[in-house]
Image (cartoon, helix red, strand yellow):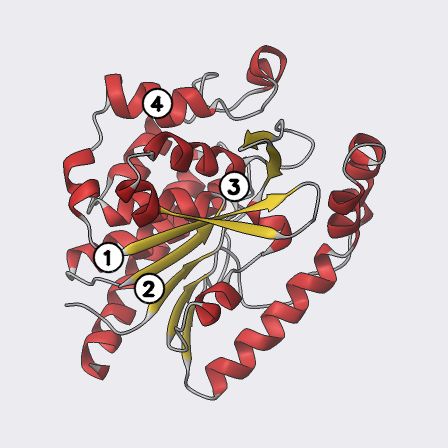
Amino acid sequence: MKLNSALVLQGGAMKSMFTTGVLDAFLEEGLIFPYIVGVSAGAANGIAFLAREKGRTCRVNLTYLHDPRFMSFKNYRKVGSYFNFDFIYKEVPHQIDPFNYDALFQAEEELEIGATNCETGEVDYFSFQEAKRGNDFQTFLRSLYASCSMPCVCKPITLNGVSYLDGGIGAPIPSGRAREQGYQNQVVILTQPLEPKQASRIRSLPPHWVYRNTYPSMVSLCDHYTEIYNQTIDSLRAEQEEGRIIVIAPDDTFGVRGISKNRTKLIRFYFHGFEKGLAYAKLLQAKQ
């Protein structure tokens, strides 16, 4: 069933296991969205959803959870990033656990990936359909690297001469981009409860040390991240009350954090998302 709504996906690294569960439930129920926008791990989930790869993201995450090639400080020393994106998005899908690229390139829906421009502090969006028409999937794949590159623990990714980092810094929840693209009706999937964040110097101090001389815009964004995030949450709550959007958020994170490696907690979080996804899929089908 094709819905007349945008699908908006928050990032959150391993916290996106909740999103993975929701999307797998949507795939089981046959839901299709004409437009998807995601940042960071939300963008990665969007690609798997576009290819109808039910179960894949959960399987890969759990299979390589403790493999140092997936995420480790060994990677940081070797390739400059805690996450080894070449292993995750090239070696695994091409050689170890083949990805269904045929289904991906047959998809007619749009997927946009947001990455934060280190120079301007703005989020630039990269279109899957444009990449497909231009036969330039490699640049689109690099935009995924950029969107997932967490500040301070991942190196900036260069695209067309511009340095990029985590799309979730400039657009924690990219619902505004969906509105810009003409989608007032949205299904927004969060990776944490629909609550404001508390300000934390732990989040803002490291960028000061790392980027103060190179990317002052990134320092400013990290300084104001909590404010930006909370404004987005307030906006989502208001739109949800008006009935324009549906927000699917976990009731609890079960202790899962961005770089969690606790298999039991991650599986529990995944199935929490799957159960929520099934319930909301029925609601969405009933509203059509």
Badge 3 vs badge 2, beta-carbon distance below 8 Å: no
Residue of label 1: 25
Residue of label 4: 90
Horizontal and vertical percent position of residue 181: 42, 67
Q: Tell me the CA gap for discs 1 and 4.
A: 26 Å
First in sequence, mark 1 or 2: give its number.
1
Nearer to us: label 3 or label 2: 3
> Quadrant of residue 48 in the image?
top left
In the picture, measured across the screen, residue 85 lies left or right of residue 109, that is right
Which residue lies at the image location 35% right of the left edge and 56% below the top edge? 273
Which residue lies at the image location 35% right of the left edge and 22% below the top edge? 90
Residue of label 2: 276
> Quadrant of residue 245 in the image?
bottom left
In the depicted structure, whether residue 286 falls above or below residue 168:
below
Element type where label 2 sits in the image: helix
First in sequence, mark 4 or 2: give its number.
4
In the picture, measured across the screen, residue 213 lies left or right of residue 190, that is right
Amino acid beneath label 3: Ser
Q: Tell me the CA gap for discs 4 and 3.
A: 16 Å
Q: Tell me the CA gap for discs 1 and 3.
A: 25 Å
Element type where label 4 sits in the image: helix
Quarter of the image where the N terminus is located: bottom left
Amino acid beneath label 1: Ala
Amino acid beneath label 2: Lys
The answer to whether residue 100 is visible is no
Residue found at the very far front of the displayed protein: 134
First in sequence, mark 1 or 3: give its number.
1
The circle drawn on residue 133 is none
First in sequence, mark 3 or 2: give its number.
3
User: Observer-nearest residue: 277 or 2?
Assistant: 2
Quarter of the image where the C terminus is located: bottom left
Instruction: Answer few, some or many: residues within 10 Å of disc 4's Cα (few below 14, many 20 plus, some between 14 and 19).
Output: some
